[in-house]
């Protein structure tokens, strides 16, 4: 398979919000739907979405007909289990590399994904950075998926592998295209709504 696949992690229960963040609405679009659109808009194909908490509800409410949905029964273990499940699915599909994004970061744009996915960097991992800080999304080459999965435990995703192998990671500044701020609380969601209202 040529090109770059997309992997959206959307399995969390949104404990601080009291509801799964995949089902949050931003301008009439669910976060999980927006995540898929952003990955596709950035040139990623196919797109795999990993669900966990409220998976049946999300499948029923979201438009996910054109993506590959993986339900991670081990989602309570943390994001590591969802990353492992997603990478395993992409391996079965024969993907050579994938951009991994999180459903609760609506500031990540298709332009950010396109810059990361299309970077000519030969590094095994290419990571978006903001104000000099590595963030999300990240492009991971197939050659490191097993190593990444081995270290993705609990609430740790690919970051553990990147910390252990800094010489194989390239950071690409994306400050001009977006941000990777999480929506974790009701206040975060309210601020997002205010920003979207100002843009109208």
Image (tube, rainbow, N blue to C red):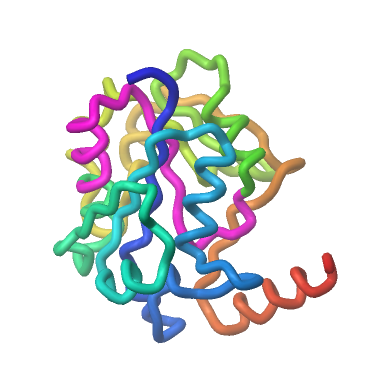
In the displayed structure, does residue 117 sit left or right of residue 115? left
> Which quadrant holds residue 20?
bottom left
Q: Confirm whether the magenta stretch covers residue 90.
A: yes
In the displayed structure, does residue 122 sit left or right of residue 156? right
On the image, the x and y values in percent for residue 109 come to: 63, 47
At 47% from the left edge and 37% from the top edge, which residue is drawn?
138
Residue 55 shows in this picture: yes
Instruction: Report the front residue among 70 and 130.
Output: 70
Q: Check the image and report above or below for 134 versus 32.
A: above
Instruction: Report the front residue among 91 and 65.
Output: 65
At 52% from the left edge and 29% from the top edge, which residue is drawn?
117
Q: Check the image and report above or below for 168 versus 108.
A: above
Q: Which quarter of the figure is the N terminus placed in?
A: top left
At 39% from the left edge and 57% from the top edge, which residue is drawn?
64
On the image, the x and y values in percent for residue 164 come to: 33, 32
> Which quadrant holds residue 118?
top right
Q: Confirm whether the magenta stretch covers residue 84.
A: no
Residue 159 shows in this picture: no
- Number of residue marks: 0
At 45% from the left edge and 18% from the top edge, which residue is drawn?
123
On the image, the x and y values in percent for residue 151 come to: 22, 42
User: Outermost residue toward the front?
Assistant: 65
Instruction: Report the front residue among 29 and 136.
Output: 29
Q: Which quarter of the figure is the C terminus placed in?
A: bottom right
Q: Check the image and report above or below for 33 versus 157.
A: below
Residue stretch in magenta: 85-108
């Amino acid at each position: 398979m040529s090109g770059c696949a997309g992997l959206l992690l959307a399995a969390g229960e949104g404990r601080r919000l009291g509801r799964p963040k995949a089902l949050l609405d931003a301008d009439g679009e669910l976060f999980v739907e927006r995540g898929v659109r952003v990955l596709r808009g950035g040139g990623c194909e196919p797109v795999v979405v990993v669900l966990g908490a409220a998976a049946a509800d999300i499948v029923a409410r979201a438009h996910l007909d054109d993506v590959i949905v993986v339900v991670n029964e081990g989602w309570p273990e943390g994001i590591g289990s969802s990353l492992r499940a997603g990478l395993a699915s992409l391996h079965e599909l024969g993907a050579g590399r994938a951009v991994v994004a999180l459903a609760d970061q609506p500031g990540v744009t298709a332009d950010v994904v396109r810059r990361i996915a299309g970077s000519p960097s030969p590094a095994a991992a290419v990571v978006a950075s903001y104000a000099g800080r590595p963030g999300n999304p990240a492009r991971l080459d197939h050659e490191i998926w097993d190593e990444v999965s081995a270290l993705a435990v609990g609430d740790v995703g690919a970051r553990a592998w990147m910390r252990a192998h800094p010489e194989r990671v390239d950071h690409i500044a994306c400050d001009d295209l977006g941000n990777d701020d999480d929506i974790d609380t009701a206040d975060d969601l309210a601020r997002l709504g205010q920003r979207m209202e100002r843009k109208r």
